[in-house]
């Protein structure tokens, strides 16, 4: 309560208990009641200000140096990856070619088991080259400069579907788009690769005669009112689905949930590439699935956070 309020007393002169209203907040605004700053106090504050500025500038210089070192290390790592890949692929091609020569020149003298061994050697060489190319692709994605432009995702999706039809003309599938997709700022070549990988997986891991895919965008209010509305995109299929415990593994490089000989093989690279592209666009990607019923892959794109 108000400290200046007169204390009430009873007939015996004892202070009365204050009514409940005495617990109400008391406040008072005062001006010009503090003592003026002394010269030594001003000097100390100025010294503290200069010390803080000095620390901030020092940390900024250290951060700039670290960024330069990181960029240099990334360039060196990329150069090493390309050089190592070239050096590794050359002997692999030699192994493949020599195995092929043995089959052509000595195939008639070899037993069936020997021919099978040669084919396995060629298969291993091809798979190793595929893995090396995948590593190069991931390295390239981390270093490449994004060509971010305003992109109509409807046109991009149509082009991607046409490419899949052209590469697999025997495959029948239906892609449904409930509502028109938005136009967004992105690298169209890379986002096309996202659609291609997600659509290809939706078809690859699907044992149904009627393969159905749905592509859409969920509109949501952005936290930044100046940037308008954001979207969460999704690709939904009616395929074999993924066990819940495996959902966190599907985006890891070289991680396959099925044996190499199942579902057309593969190196376990596609979703790792997709994840890298989405991260380069400042977005996130995740999956929801139910075994035997299908999967839905969600992703976001946030061009405002892109930096090269």
Image (cartoon, rainbow, N blue to C red):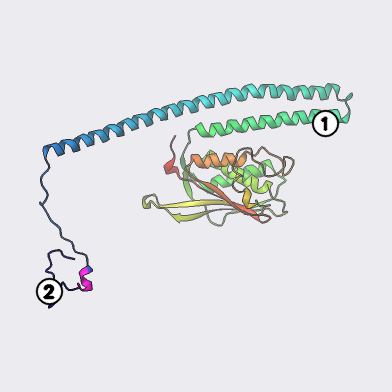
- In the rendered image, the residue lying farthest to the bottom is 11
**Residue 172 vs residue 279: left or right?**
right
Question: Around disc 2, counting alpha carbons within 10 Å, would you say few (fewer than 14), some (14 to 19), or many (20 or more)?
Answer: few
Closer to the eye: label 2 or 1: 2
Residue at x 34%, y 29% (from the top left corner):
61
From the viewer's side, name the closer residue of 154 and 61: 61
Range covered by the magenta-colored residues: 17-22
Residue 266 in magenta stretch: no
Disc marking residue 116:
1
From the viewer's side, name the closer residue of 292 and 215: 292
Residue at x 41%, y 27% (from the top left corner):
68
Quarter of the figure with residue 178: bottom right
Above/below status of 9 relative to 112: below
Q: How far apart are marks 2 and 1 (CA)?
A: 113 Å
Residue at x 66%, y 24% (from the top left corner):
89
Circle 2 sits in a helix, a strand or a loop, which is it?
loop
From the viewer's side, name the closer residue of 245 and 291: 245
Above/below status of 276 relative to 212: above
- In the rendered image, the residue lying farthest to the front is 12
**Residue 157 vs residue 32: left or right?**
right
């Amino acid at each position: 309560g108000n400290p200046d309020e007169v204390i009430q007393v009873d007939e015996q002169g004892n202070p009365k208990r204050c009514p409940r209203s005495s617990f109400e907040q008391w406040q008072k605004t005062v001006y010009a009641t503090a003592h003026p700053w002394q010269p030594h106090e001003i000097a100390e504050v100025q010294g503290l200000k200069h010390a803080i500025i000095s620390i901030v500038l020092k940390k900024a210089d250290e951060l700039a140096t670290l960024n330069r070192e990181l960029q240099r290390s990334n360039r060196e790592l990329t150069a090493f990856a390309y050089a190592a890949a070239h050096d590794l692929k050359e002997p692999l091609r030699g192994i493949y070619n020599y195995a092929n020569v043995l089959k052509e020149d000595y195939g008639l003298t070899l037993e069936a088991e020997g021919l099978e061994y040669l084919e396995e050697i060629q298969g291993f060489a091809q798979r190793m080259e595929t893995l090396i190319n995948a590593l190069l692709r991931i390295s390239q994605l981390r270093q490449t400069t994004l060509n971010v432009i305003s992109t109509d995702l409807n046109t991009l999706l149509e082009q991607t579907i046409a490419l899949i039809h052209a590469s697999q003309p025997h495959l029948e599938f239906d892609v449904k788009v409930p509502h028109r997709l938005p136009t967004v700022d992105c690298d169209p070549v890379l986002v096309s690769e996202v659609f291609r990988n997600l659509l290809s997986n939706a078809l690859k891991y699907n044992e149904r005669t009627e393969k159905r895919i749905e592509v859409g965008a969920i509109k949501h209010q952005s936290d930044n009112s100046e940037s308008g509305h954001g979207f969460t995109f999704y690709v939904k299929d009616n395929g074999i689905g993924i066990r819940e415990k495996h959902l966190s593994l599907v985006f890891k490089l070289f991680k396959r949930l099925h044996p190499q000989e199942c579902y057309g093989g593969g190196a376990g690279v596609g979703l790792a590439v997709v994840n890298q592209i989405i991260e380069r666009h400042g977005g996130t990607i995740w999956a929801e699935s139910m075994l035997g019923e299908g999967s839905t892959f969600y992703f976001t794109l946030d061009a405002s956070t892109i930096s090269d």
